[in-house]
Amino acid sequence: MDDNFDAELLADLCTLTGRPAPKRDEVRVWSMSGVERLTFPDGSTAIYKYARRPFDSEDQALRLARTLGIPVPHVHVSARIGGWLGMLLEDLGAPVRDADSLDGAAAAVVLHRTRAASALSMLDAEALGALPRHALDHLDQLRKIDRWQDTEDIERVLDQITLAAEARADGATVAPFGWVHSEFHPTSLHIGKRGWRLLDFARAFTGPGLLDLASWHGTLDAPDPARLRGFIESYVNEGGAPDALAERGGLAAEKWALGWHRMWAVEWFMEQSIRWINDPAADPAYIEVVRRHLTDVLQLLEG
């Protein structure tokens, strides 16, 4: 973030809460967002989180989630300046332990039971099936500005997936359907002395809850349908919708979830490349990730 914007944004947040300038300690910072722990002269603390588009509506999602009963950090105050969102959040302190799969299953049950919110964007069967077409559009735009050359293999795979997308997207609205966290990983679940809280709601939407379950184990390793099947079973045992185990789009639930989660990630990576990050130097890394994920998508959604 530009230093002037940064200083002004934090000053605005402190003014709104009637607090003096704090001591700042970085927790996690990257090009599009950052998290810091603030310590004020009286010894009190808060979390300062800032982000630019498309992560600049998290304050609204967190307030809505809290209103509907989802355990999330309290937003003390938020403000915007120069295209950046800034928030002062409740400091949850250090976690007492890392979240495990049982914690994740129980948290997902609470999240997915929550009443759907019309303010969130929608990813139903039609929108899900359109993801490969959107990815092809991104690829076309990138090529027009002489980027992502020699990617005919990516185009061919996206064409194959597009042909099957409508049929494979069937069942998207089968329960659980509603709140989707979209960044549902063990690091997004804080286990503290006063219970658990879900973090990182910057990309929450309304859609198939199975995408959250598929994201829990991340995308760095090869997809493991058997492991996800076990996680879905734990989710159902914790009170999740029994239909989470049902076939959809002609596929077992775990293969459907893994395939579409990776397709969702592919479209997001390609949109980042053309819109949000737009850095040609990052293209080789993004192309490699997209190729890897598309190989997985094709294997999973082919059945």
Image (spheres, grey):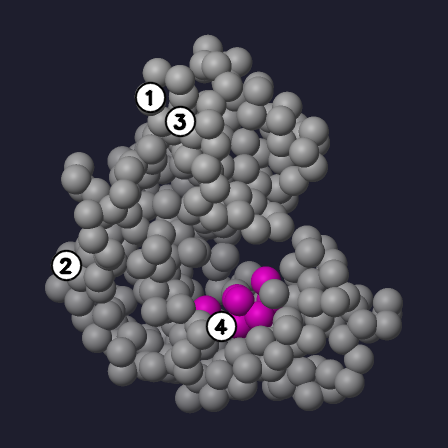
Q: Position of residue 159 (x, y in %)?
A: 66, 83
Q: Position of residue 132 (x, y in %)?
A: 61, 72
What type is the residue that disc 2 sits on?
Answer: Glu
Q: Position of residue 43 (x, y in %)?
A: 33, 21
Q: Is residue 74 left or right of residue 192?
A: right
Dot 2: element: loop
Q: Are marks 4 and 3 in contact (CB under 8 Å)?
A: no
248 or 95: which is nearer to us? 95
* Front position among marks 4 and 3: 3
Residue carrying label 2:
238
What type is the residue that disc 1 sits on?
Answer: Gly
Question: Is the residue 162 above or below the residue 184 in the image?
Answer: below
Q: Are marks 1 and 3 in contact (CB under 8 Å)?
A: yes
Q: Are marks 4 and 2 in contact (CB under 8 Å)?
A: no
Question: Is the residue 258 above or below the residue 242 in the image?
Answer: below
Alpha-carbon neighbours of circle 3 within 10 Å: few (<14), some, or many (≥20)?
some
- Name the disc covering residue 262, or none: 4
Q: Quadrant of the C terminus?
A: bottom left
Dot 3: element: strand
Residue 99 in magenta stretch: no
Residue carrying label 1:
43
- Name the disc covering residue 39, or none: 3
Picture quadrant of residue 42: top left
Q: Quadrant of the N terminus?
A: top right
Mark-to-mark CA distance, 4 and 2:
25 Å
Q: Is residue 249 visible?
A: no
Q: Earlier in the sequence, mark 4 or mark 3?
A: 3
